[in-house]
């Protein structure tokens, strides 16, 4: 079981295929939400993922400032159904925040959170900065993390 972080240009075609396959499985099929999953932003992003053999068990897209918002952002956070409840989402998110703050040197991270996940993101210091709104028929809230001082400890 290994964690990887790669810029789009470093991904192999197989890695890119697995990423897009899992994102489509969850965001389009599982959530019954037809929308253009491939949105042109991937080309400028880092992709953080965990593999168990050849199976992707967790993934997040890390967006530098200026791609989605003026701040850096984390998006497309997924853990396939068969791997949920094992702590992978927490480790994924801690690693994503640490990369953005420690490697990219960013002090603010903005996310578009599904409303039911606000307590999860709040546990990492994110605060709601919008009222709930519908995005593709799913309630969302914009959240912001500002200036966390120390890296999160991940195992």
Image (spheres, rainbow, N blue to C red):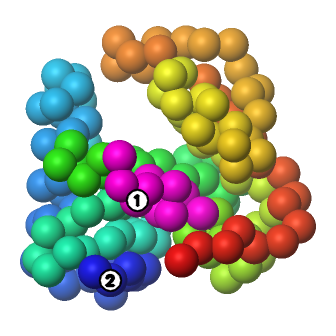
User: Does residue 15 appear in this view?
Assistant: yes
Which residue appears at 19% of the width and 84% of the height? 12
Image quarter in which the C terminus is found: bottom right
State which quadrant residue 121 falls in: top right
Dot 1: element: helix
The magenta stretch spans which residues? 85-94
Instruction: List x then y, in percent, for residue 125.
Output: 77, 46
Seen at 35% across and 19% down, the residue is 136
Q: Which residue is mark 1?
A: 88
Q: Is 81 left or right of 3, judged from the image as shown?
A: left
**For mark 1, does the 10 Å Cα neighbourhood hold few (<14), some (14 to 19), or many (20 or more) residues?**
some
Secondary structure mostly seen in magenta is helix
Q: Which residue is mark 2?
A: 2
Q: Residues within 10 Å of mark 2 (few under 14, many from 20)?
A: few
Q: Are marks 1 and 2 in contact (CB under 8 Å)?
A: no
Q: Quadrant of residue 131?
A: top right
The x and y percentages for residue 124 are: 70, 49
Q: Is residue 91 magenta?
A: yes
Horizontally, residue 119 falls left or right of residue 105, namely: left
Callout 2 secondary element: strand
């Amino acid at each position: 079981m290994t964690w990887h972080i790669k810029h789009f240009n470093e991904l192999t075609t197989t890695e890119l295929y697995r990423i897009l396959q899992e994102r489509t499985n969850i965001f389009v099929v599982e959530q019954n939400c037809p929308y253009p999953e491939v949105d042109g932003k991937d080309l400028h992003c880092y992709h953080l993922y965990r593999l168990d053999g050849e199976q992707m068990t967790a993934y997040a897209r890390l967006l530098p400032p200026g791609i989605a918002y003026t701040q850096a952002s984390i998006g497309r956070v997924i853990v396939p159904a068969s791997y949920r409840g094992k702590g992978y989402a927490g480790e994924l998110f801690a690693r994503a925040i640490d990369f953005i703050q420690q490697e990219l040197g960013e002090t603010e991270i903005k996310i578009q959170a599904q409303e039911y996940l606000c307590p999860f993101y709040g546990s990492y210091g994110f605060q709601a900065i919008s009222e709930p709104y519908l995005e593709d028929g799913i309630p969302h809230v914009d959240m912001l993390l500002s200036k966390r001082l120390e890296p999160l400890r991940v195992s």
